[in-house]
Image (spheres, rainbow, N blue to C red):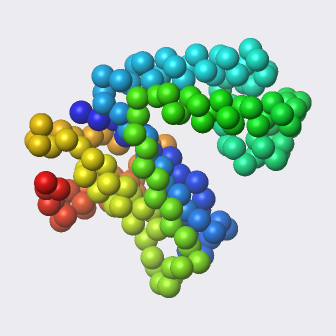
């Protein structure tokens, strides 16, 4: 069993306020979840001790690098903000995870009713399914975890994929 955590960047509306919609998935074998979580917790504590970065504050690289709110009040120097991003990249590289990102370039969409989130999720789910080792274990599956605002749309898309598009990848 795999655990897939999804998060998005940008607006999935067309036309929207953002030029891109990016849907990212970080997935791992369930046996690696606790170890990965512990490393992330330790890293967050490190950021707090070294830079004064609040443990529960999300890291949004663009806003952090540009010293925008909510990061500005913490008085983190330019060099330290760049170092934080570098350390975040090092952390991600050290985790026992796989990552899939799907980017929809919204200026290339020709139909006003193009289902941005539905398409991005469909492509992402197909990519993860292709990566599962079904030859070794045909029961291999994954569970999706996402934020509350997307559960309804993502549930309907994944159920549709299961019903209509069941094609074993190997």
* Residue 13, horizontal then vertical, whole percent: 55, 69
Asked whether 78 or 11 is in front, the reply is 78
Left or right of 68 on screen, residue 39: left
Asked whether 164 or 96 is in front, the reply is 96
For the view shown, which residue lies furthest in the bottom direction? 110
Asked whether 105 or 87 is in front, the reply is 87
* Residue 116, horizontal then vertical, whole percent: 46, 68
Which residue is rendered at x = 81% and y = 30% of the image?
Answer: 80
Which residue is rendered at x = 63% and y = 22% of the image?
Answer: 44
Instruction: Reply above or below: 39 against 88.
Output: above
Q: How many marks?
A: 0
Quarter occupied by residue 84: top right
Which residue is rendered at x = 58% and y = 16% of the image?
Answer: 42
Which residue is rendered at x = 29% and y = 57% of the image?
Answer: 126
Left or right of 89 on screen, residue 160: left
* Residue 10, horizontal then vertical, whole percent: 60, 59
Left or right of 95 on screen, residue 127: left
Is residue 149 visible in the rendered image? The answer is no
Instruction: Reply above or below: 42 against 84.
Output: above
Quarter of the image where the C terminus is located: bottom left
Quarter occupied by residue 161: bottom left
Left or right of 131 on screen, residue 24: right
Is residue 71 visible in the rendered image? The answer is yes
Quarter of the image where the N terminus is located: top left
């Amino acid at each position: 069993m795999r655990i897939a955590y999804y998060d998005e960047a940008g607006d999935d509306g067309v036309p929207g306020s953002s030029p891109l919609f990016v849907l990212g998935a970080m997935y791992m074998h369930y046996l690696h979840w606790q170890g990965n979580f512990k490393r992330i917790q330790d890293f967050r504590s490190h950021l707090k001790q070294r830079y004064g970065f609040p443990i529960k504050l999300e890291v949004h690289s663009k806003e952090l690098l540009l010293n925008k709110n909510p990061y500005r009040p913490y008085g983190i120097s330019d060099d330290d903000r760049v170092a934080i991003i570098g350390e975040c990249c090092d952390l991600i590289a050290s985790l026992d995870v796989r990552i899939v990102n799907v980017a929809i370039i919204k200026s290339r969409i020709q139909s006003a009713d193009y289902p941005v989130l539905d398409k991005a999720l469909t492509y992402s789910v197909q990519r993860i399914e292709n990566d599962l080792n079904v030859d070794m274990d045909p029961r291999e599956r994954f569970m999706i975890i996402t934020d509350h605002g997307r559960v309804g749309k993502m549930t309907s898309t994944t159920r549709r994929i299961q019903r209509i598009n069941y094609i074993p990848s190997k």
